[in-house]
Amino acid sequence: MWLSRLWGTQEVIFFLSITSYVCHLAGAISISSYQQSLTKSVQEDVMFSVDISCLGIPTIQWSFMSARVSRTIGSWQPGGITNVSEEYTDRVQTFNNGSMALSDLSVEDAGFYVITVTELSGSSKDAGFVLKVEEVLYEDLQYLSVFTVVLAFLAAALMLSMWLMDKTYRQLKAWNRQRQKKDNDETELQAL
Ligand SMILES: *[C@@H]1O[C@H](CO)[C@@H](O)[C@H](O)[C@H]1NC(C)=O
Ligand SMILES: *[C@@H]1O[C@H](CO)[C@@H](O)[C@H](O)[C@H]1NC(C)=O
């Protein structure tokens, strides 16, 4: 081979170690994601989608931080053991590319989510996500406004029918009185 003829083994090893050193300085670990800020509603699911690349098999760890708490959600190695903390076991799904899905969100889940990728060499890198969890107030308000409109409509219909019934009753009474008067007049006329 021309390469081994041109370069001795030692030079090749030197070149390789320089390359890996430069890669290390430049940050061999990369964490890419489409979205760092997510907004979800209560009871919805969220997917913290990332794609990591690094040397060898990394250890992925996800932690949660809010104004009140700071805790580790879980850690795993792609294709290896997964260790998810007890309070998250039935809600968390882990993926080999580092992504994590969290289901059945509550307002308490709002906060910062941090992924830490650690290589075998010990070097690590973090990436953070912000999650907002909204309560479903909008739909409630919509139901309430529809309900109010229906109630107002029913009340108006009721008032209109009462007014119509009252008017009909008065008219019937007037007719009755008129007919009685007419009958009386006729009998009076006949009597004459
Ligand atoms: C990571 O993997 C999951 C599951 O296969 C996929 O849904 C997600 O899009 C991937 N994320 C990225 C950034 O590629
Ligand atoms: C699993 O994680 C918990 C904390 O989240 C830690 O205390 C425990 O040592 C871990 N177990 C293993 C086997 O890594």
Image: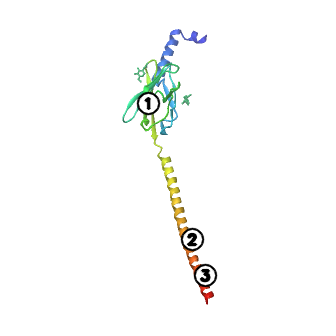
Mark 2 — residue? 168
Q: In the rendered structure, which amino acid carries the disc numbered 1?
A: Val
10 Å neighbourhood of mark 1: few (<14), some, or many (≥20)? some
Proximity of marks 3 and 2: CB atoms separated by less than 8 Å: no
Going from N to C along the chain, the mark reached first, 1 or 3, is 1
**Residue under pointer 1:** 114
- The image quadrant that residue 109 belongs to is top left
Residue at screen point 48% across, 50% down: 141
Scheme of colours in the image = rainbow
Labelled pair 1, 3 in contact (Cβ < 8 Å): no
Q: CA distance from mark 3 to mark 2?
A: 22 Å
Q: Residue at x 48, y 24 (%)?
A: 29
The residue pinned by badge 3 equals 183
| Secondary structure type for disc 2 | helix
Q: In percent of the image, x 51 and y 15: which residue is there?
A: 16
Residue type at mark 2 is Thr
